[in-house]
Amino acid sequence: MQKEEHLTIRPIRRVKLILPALTEATSPYWRPIKYSLFPPLGLATLAAYLDPGLDIRIVDEHVETLGLDDDPDLVVIQVYITNAWRAYRIADHYRARGSYVILGGLHVTSLPEEAARHADTIFLGPGEDTFPTFLKDLAARAPHSRYSSPVRTIEGIPPIRRDLIQRRLYLVPNSIVVSRGCPHHCTFCYKDAFFEGGRTYYTQRVDQALAEISRLPGRHLYFLDDHLFGNPRFARDLFRGMRGMGRVFQGAATVDSILRDNTVEAAAAAGLRSLFVGFETLSESGLAGARKRQNLGRSYRDVVRRLDDLGIMINGSFVFGFDSDDKDVFARTVEWAIESGITTATFHVLTPYPGTPLFSEMEAQGRITTRDWDLYDTRHVVYEPRLLAPADLKAGYDWAYREFYRWSSIGRGALSHASMKHRLKHFAYSAGWKKFERLWGSVIRLKQLTQARPLLEAILAPVAGTPDITAEDAKLAPVLPVDGDPENPAGIPPSVTIAAP
Ligand code: B12
Ligand code: SF4
């Protein structure tokens, strides 16, 4: 549908791209270091489509104050579920001042009608095709009120406008994504709703990904891909290309992709030093209910051992509140994580995001207890659990964090590794992440995160004997066939993943 009020659109000279802060920013859960990790990569990706001659600003409200008394001609706002209310308030404000306001991102895609009330134009799905189309329509003074992304590719996209990112405000300015989506379909995950109507998993070209990596200064990289090993051929070619670049990096992959072939060895040889792994639950029926087939029947012990042998630290993701979870789930999970030597753990309360199969199921069963999106942060209980009272689920979740990050637990976890160096790294990384909140707060206030980066790189230095597999090994690694998934013509093995970071 075309906008009726298009004649009132101002000529576009000043563009403001905003990542609003979640309401949590003022709550006791606020952890400054968590929100000073990564810059707004999605907005910097979109900025690359704007005429570089324009006055363009990216404002990330997590790390800087958002001034509201300016008059940009175009305001671009990224909406996650937890920042939705804040995003709408900012949008309403700028519309009242005559700016042309557009909203996009995950939450807009899940609930377009809700978002449309606060925007001149909304965007569903990824923006690499729709945003440039919109810019052309806007220049012709005929923008539509809604764009849905029909084309799914990130091949040949313009270089991300990293120059618009204030690197010194982030511990990890070198975040990067070389793929979009994931080959799997867990019922609680955002991704099928977000990528509906097109491919739900696709990668960059290897040469372009390597070019993007070589543009990044320094040593440390963080791949934010949902599943870095999602396409093993792509992953191994990428890691082969990265060898010799002197990088250390972190990323996320699934349980089965770690056990499947030697992609993980190729990654280690290229500089992988810590991996986010979506274990989610130790319960087979929990996994089956979440359609996390990729984890089913896999040995979590073998995953831990394999990563440990490669000197790769593990950030384990765990979800509480599946229908099979009872009061014992917290102690069972935390004990397993500590004694297995998981370096850092990310716990979540199961959260049914709108648009997901989990949300539809729960809604149909009348189990959704609130639609206050501020509470959909994986720390609050927003539905009626089966075998637990909501208060017990919340208390168990809080207990799990406290217990896992006790000094004694950190010590016990560290001691589970064979090498002294790995023990020390475990201790430093785990304690550094959770035990020095006030110190991080001061470093951030003094804008000294750049000084902390070498420390992070030192902790991520290789443990003795990181394997050095040859390019030939990587090429010959087996690629398992896939059972006729029409979304998976490249033969990507069925694997698992990752919930929210
Ligand atoms: C990095 C990250 C974070 C970082 C920082 C985010 C940042 N600075 O951007 C940190 C650690 C702070 C974080 C925190 C949280 N996160 Co987070 N995070 C991610 C992650 C892993 C990557 C985001 C990213 O950079 N993607 C790559 C870029 C290129 O894509 P993009 O940002 O989506 O942008 C594209 C499109 O969305 C679109 N687009 C976006 N905005 C707009 C606007 C317009 C106008 C247009 C045209 C297009 C458009 O165009 C872009 C290019 O295609 C995603 C998972 C994922 N794969 O996206 C989860 C994810 C976004 N996080 C999620 C959640 C739940 C959280 C937390 C609530 C979790 C928690 N318990 O702490 C918090 C709260 C965050 C908040 N501010 O509200 C969920 C969101 C679910 C939802 N329905 O909204 C996700 C999807 C993870 C998941 N699997 O569930 N997160
Ligand atoms: S494996 Fe992870 S990213 Fe993929 S669908 Fe499942 S939860 Fe989502």
Image: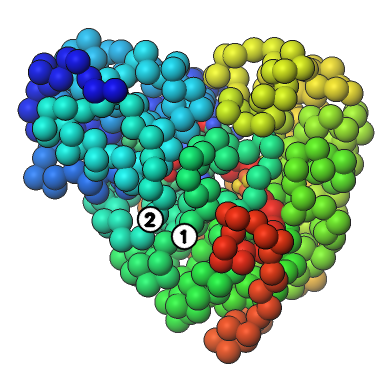
Q: Does the closest atom of ligand 1 sit within 8 Å of the Cβ of label 2? A: yes
The residue that mark 2 highlights is: 154
Is residue 374 found left or right of 208 in the rendered image? right
| Residue situated in front as seen by the camera: 247 or 372 | 372
- Residue type, numbered disc 1: Thr
Asked if residue 202 shows in the view, the reply is yes
Residue 208 versus residue 4 in the image, above or below:
below
* Figure coloring: rainbow
Q: Position of residue 405 (x, y in %)?
A: 73, 42
Residue 410 versus residue 416 in the image, above or below:
above
The residue that mark 1 highlights is: 203
Q: Position of residue 102 (x, y in %)?
A: 29, 26
Q: Residue at x 60, y 55 (%)?
A: 486
Neighbourhood count class around disc 1 (C-alpha, 10 Å): few under 14, some 14–19, many 20 upward: many
Q: Position of residue 365 (x, y in %)?
A: 77, 17
Q: Residue at x 10, y 18 (%)?
A: 7
Q: Residue at x 80, y 32 (%)?
A: 322
Question: Cα distance, mark 1 to mark 2?
Answer: 7 Å
- Residue type, numbered disc 2: Ile
Q: Secondary structure at mark 2?
A: loop
